[in-house]
């Protein structure tokens, strides 16, 4: 469904952030893009959703295809019309609007009123907490409730592909588990393809079919989620686990990064 083909991204024609990133998302699958802060995860999502254009960013090499159509020159409104929706990092709700008004904003390009009403009820089915808060100003919601609202709003456009940027950011572990269980349920029921950007590798890989690791603007490792979960280096550097029960030395860390680049 989605093919990102060896793209490079620059901001203001000068600052290079991505250096030959390639990835794929098959129809109905969940794919994770893992990496530390500043690795290029969010920029990759913005390149797909067209949001780069709002920040003076541009895909300068390579291309992005969605359902066989090249989209890397499209603006965000054109990309959204094709069926790609992005839930932004940081729980960006419209604080002065109620929960239900936020959901309606997500359906702004739709004309089927009955379908919109049905989908709002479906969002309340997936996120029962939101139903009791439907008339409340969204700025007063807790962090977890705002994250649920942002995901629900993105789903209101009935996307073929949902881009989720750090859905676990700043949330307690139990809330993270709850939200990821709901994300998995949505994928199973609606067959919505998903690309999830995360630092929380444990949460993301627990529901993903496939995963990529990005560092310094390059994909350095990829494979089925099960293989990544069992990879010693992923466990050490992205899950905080170590088979030896101790941290590796600085020299070993540097070797790890070099080895990953060679593998890529």
Image (spheres, rainbow, N blue to C red):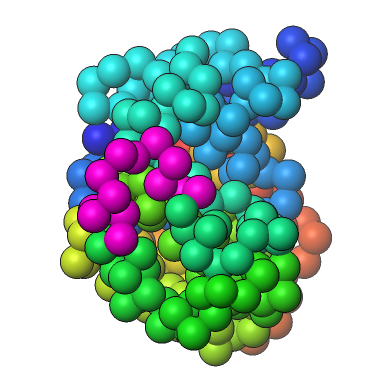
Q: Nearer the viewer, residue 109 or 155?
A: 109
> Image check: 158 left or right of 168?
left
User: Compared with residue 240, is residue 6 higher up or lower down, i.e. above or below?
Assistant: above
Residue at x 51% of width, y 74% of height: 134
Q: Quadrant of residue 135?
A: bottom right
Q: Position of residue 167 (x, y in %)?
A: 55, 64
Q: How many marks?
A: 0
Q: Nearer the viewer, residue 26 or 162?
A: 162
Q: Residue at x 62, y 16 (%)?
A: 58
- Residue 112: in magenta span: yes
Q: Is residue 66 visible?
A: yes
Quadrant occupied by the N terminus: top left
Residue 104 is left or right of residue 248, and the answer is left
Q: Is residue 230 above or below residue 69?
A: below
Q: Position of residue 101 (x, y in %)?
A: 53, 59
Q: Residue at x 29, y 69 (%)?
A: 122
Q: Residue, x 72% and y 52% (percent of image)?
A: 37
Tell me the magenta residue range: 105-117
Determine whether 205 is above or below 70 in the image.
Answer: below
Where in the figure is residue 257, as x and y percent of width and height?
A: 65, 48
Q: Is residue 240 visible?
A: no
The answer to whether residue 235 is magenta is no
Q: Position of residue 34 (x, y in %)?
A: 54, 54
Quarter of the image for residue 185 reads bottom left
């Amino acid at each position: 469904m989605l093919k990102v083909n060896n793209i490079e991204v620059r901001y203001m024609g000068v600052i290079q952030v991505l250096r030959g990133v390639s990835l794929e998302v098959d129809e109905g699958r969940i794919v994770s893009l893992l990496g530390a802060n500043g690795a290029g995860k969010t920029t990759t999502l913005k390149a797909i959703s067209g949001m780069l254009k709002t920040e003076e960013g541009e895909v300068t090499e390579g291309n992005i295809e969605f359902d066989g159509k090249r989209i890397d020159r499209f603006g965000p409104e054109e990309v959204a019309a094709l069926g790609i929706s992005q839930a932004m990092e940081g729980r960006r709700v419209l604080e002065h609007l109620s929960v239900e008004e936020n959901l309606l904003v997500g359906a702004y390009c739709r004309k089927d009123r009955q379908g919109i009403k049905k989908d709002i009820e479906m969002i309340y089915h997936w996120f029962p907490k939101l139903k009791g808060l439907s008339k409340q100003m969204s700025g007063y919601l807790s962090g977890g409730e705002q994250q649920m609202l942002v995901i629900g709003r993105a789903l209101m456009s009935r996307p073929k592909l949902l881009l989720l940027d750090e859905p676990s950011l700043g949330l307690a572990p139990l809330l993270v588990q709850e939200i990821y269980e709901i994300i998995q349920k949505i994928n199973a029921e609606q067959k919505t393809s998903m690309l999830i950007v995360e630092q929380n590798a444990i949460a993301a890989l627990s529901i993903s079919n496939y995963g990529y690791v990005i560092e310094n603007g390059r994909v350095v490792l990829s494979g089925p989620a099960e293989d990544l979960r069992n990879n010693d280096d992923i466990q050490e550097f992205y899950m905080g686990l170590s088979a030896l029960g101790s941290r590796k030395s600085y020299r070993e860390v540097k070797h790890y990064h070099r080895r990953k680049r060679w593998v890529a």
